[in-house]
Image (cartoon, rainbow, N blue to C red):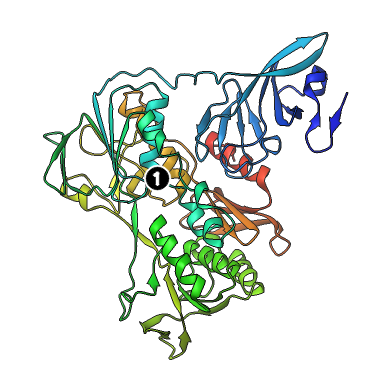
Amino acid sequence: MAEDKKLGPDLTQGVPLSSIEDGGSLLGHVGADAVLLVRQGADVFAIAAECTHYHGPLAEGVVQGYEVRCPWHHACFDIRTGEALHAPALSPLACWSVEQQGGNVFVRTKIPQPKPRPRGKPSDTPSKIVIVGGGAAGFAAAEMLRRQGYQDSIVMLSSDDAPPVDRPNLSKDYLAGSAPEDWLPLRPDDFYKDNHIDLRLKSDVGKIDPRAGAVTLADGSALPYDRLLLATGAEPVRLPIPGADLPHVHVLRSLADCRAIIKAADAAKRVVVIGASFIGLEVAASLHARKVEVHVVAPEKRPLERVFGPQMGDFVRKLHEEHGVVFHLEDSSEEITANQVKLKSGAMLDADLVVAGVGVRPRLSLAEQAGLALDRGVKVDAYLQTSAPNIFAAGDIARWPDPHSGETIRVEHWVVAERQGQIAALNMLGMRQPFTAVPFFWSQHYDIPINYVGHAEKWDDIEIEGDISAKDCLLRYRLSGKVLAVASIFRDRESLEAEIAMERGAP
């Protein structure tokens, strides 16, 4: 039996069924294609071995029933059909036919993509769905509607000038120069035409009238709806200091923002990043990769301590300093001039380029105008429905009842926004699917990924397993003995297992 050291056995030659544990998997290959065999009892399924998101190795993930989860960013697939069940993956896995003969398993032929298994039975058939927002939640909703066989009108209104893109990449590989721009679109331009999704870019909404069931655009035209998804996202906080509007001062949210920073960085020698947020520090790492001297100014004692705690905060600071980033902590910017940033301490930092990463705020003006219930976000129920009939909300604006923490929470994570968009799509069709996903995000600092599952706004204990400085650790954030969140570095399988345990309500 031929075997490739990287891809395992040649599955066209067959492997013993006994070599695949029940509930387990085996990595092999069919020609040049890496194929993962997954066994459930007497049944064996063959799927592509790489996640369709960022090509994560599914053989290193977790199999649970008829699902396999990617170890990198926690995408989830149906092993029977290849369907991408949970974001961040949106595209299905390729599937192969499986034959069993004489106690051996053979895989030879790739098969047409099986139809997705129904998520539920639609109890409603709205004829007009409008999505306000062209980000993660809005796109995921539109894609899921078509995937579920919805045939009627979908209009997506986006204030952006570019179709939906992979926003996490804007502060990571694309900004660093290690990913081409053609990686960024979530789908090619013809996807929208082929799927009859009326994507309207540079379209600003003036108001929403819940009673009339209509959206009024900025040009005064009206657009009726039967169901509306509000997914307006968040906008960067602008610095309230003199000079914040100078042309060399940037924020990062859109593709246009990222292009402008890249253009400015090409001619810059030194950048000052104001804010030690996730965006700020990822920008610092990415611009360092472009050979720009980087200084970070922030008022806190440690970067990211509010989310990760002091130990991980110290690690993140040391990691950046090892790459040459200079921190100015427990300080803040007072003024920006054409070539300097003045700090509260009196220090003056030379700066050809300034990037402000001091947080974002949810875009709530439309929700407020429409009279929707608000609570530091748009209040939604377990089905992501707002206080108004036929209006749903998802993404950065939504505050929902989280069954895992027992709190109502709002988070600004890309994966959460996508997953909420998918569930909102099902519920706009009347399927009554509660949103129960455990929040997840990842942050990239040079070659070090930090994964985080759960949501802990406060804790009274951090249990550290492994060694943070050795970049091999898992941190559990507890409140009154309950694990609310888990952060990890290169503990991918444990991170997945923690997510599954939280979903089940297990300790």
321 left or right, relative to 456: right
The residue labelled by disc 1 is 164
Name which residue lies at 39% across and 66% down. Answer: 251
Q: Which of the 4 quarters of the picture holds residue 465?
A: bottom right
Q: x%, y% of residue 426?
A: 37, 28
Q: Which of the 4 quarters of the picture holds residue 259?
A: bottom left
Name which residue lies at 40% across and 23% down. Answer: 148
Q: Secondary structure at mark 1?
A: loop
Image quarter of the C terminus: top right
Query: 210 or 225, which lies in front?
Result: 225
Question: Which amino acid type corresponds to the residue marked 1 in the rendered image?
Answer: Pro
88 left or right, relative to 98: left
Disc 1 packing (10 Å; few <14; some 14–19; many ≥20)? many
Asked if 252 appears above or below 136 in the picture, the reply is below
Name which residue lies at 70% across and 38% down. Answer: 60
User: Is residue 14 shown to the viewer in this render?
Assistant: no
Q: x%, y% of residue 253?
A: 40, 58
User: Is residue 302 shown to the viewer in this render?
Assistant: yes
Q: x%, y% of residue 335?
A: 35, 83
Q: Looking at this rendering, what residue extends furthest in the bottom direction?
A: 346
Query: 268 or 416, which lies in front?
Result: 268
Count of picture labels: 1
Q: Looking at this rendering, what residue extends furthest in the right direction?
A: 1
